[in-house]
Image (tube, rainbow, N blue to C red):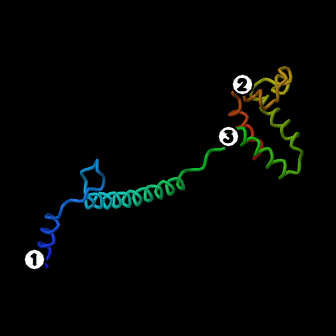
Amino acid sequence: MGQNACDLFRMSMNKPKEVVNSDSTLTKRDMELIAGIVTMVMQNMETRVSTIEKRVEERQALLPAPEISPRMHINKLVREYANKHNEQFADIWKLLYSEYGYRKNYNPVVRANNRNMKTLDYIEEQDGLAVLESVAVIILK
């Protein structure tokens, strides 16, 4: 096998080079070699990219769920309490606003009405959602 390989190598060296493009100095063999290398590199990159994508998907599955906003949490507490005690939502909101007013020393319903706003929007504008949420947790649990 060694002698045959040497003979084949010598024969290929003695053959005139076939030029693929008249502007190029690359032979057909050079082009095949380059194409083979490019194919191998692309396969390697495809494997690496799919591995990275798989790991990204796994990491996303491990990410914690987004937090619920204070406004949504208050709304959830009011709905759950009203459903559990078979009461009207409006009555629970009145109770919650009343308790909030006692803690903040003002009536949020009156202040919101004076500004032509919804009460919850007024409380949010005054940065009072955290207090309202804590009152809701105490009152509605």
Instruction: Kindly state the secondary structure of the residue where label 3 is placed.
Output: loop
Counting other residues with Cα less than 10 Å from the Cα at mark 2, is it few (<14), some (14-19), or many (20 or more)? few
Q: Nearer the viewer, residue 40 or 54?
A: 40
Q: Are marks 2 and 1 in contact (CB under 8 Å)?
A: no
The label shown at residue 85 is none
Between residues 4 and 43, which one lies in front from this camera angle? 4
Q: Nearer the viewer, mark 1 or mark 3?
A: 1
Residue reaching furthest to the left = 3
Looking at the image, is mark 3 or mark 2 nearer the viewer?
3
Q: Residue at x 28, y 60 (%)?
A: 28
Kindly indicate the quadrant of the structure image that contains residue 38: bottom left
Task: Give the image location of residue 131, x and y in percent.
Answer: 70, 33
Q: Is residue 28 left or right of residue 123?
A: left
Task: Report the amino acid beneath label 3.
Answer: Ser
For this rendering, which residue is in front, 20 or 69? 20
**Could you say which quadrant of the image residue 124 lies in?**
top right
Secondary structure of the residue carrying numbered label 1: helix
Label 1 amino acid?
A: Gln
Q: Please, what secondary structure does the residue beneath circle 2 have?
A: loop
Return the x and y of residue 52 as percentages of the image width and height: 43, 55
Query: Residue 127, how many percent across, how many down?
Result: 69, 27
Q: For the residues labelled 3 and 2, say whether their Cβ atoms are less than 8 Å apart.
A: no
- Residue positioned 86% across, 24% down in the render: 113
Which residue is denoted by mark 1 in the rendering? Answer: 3
Checking the image for residue 126, the label placed there is: 2
Res. 69 mark: 3
Disc with the residue nearer the chain's start (2 vs 1): 1
Residue 67 appears left or right of 97:
left
Location of the N terminus by quadrant is bottom left
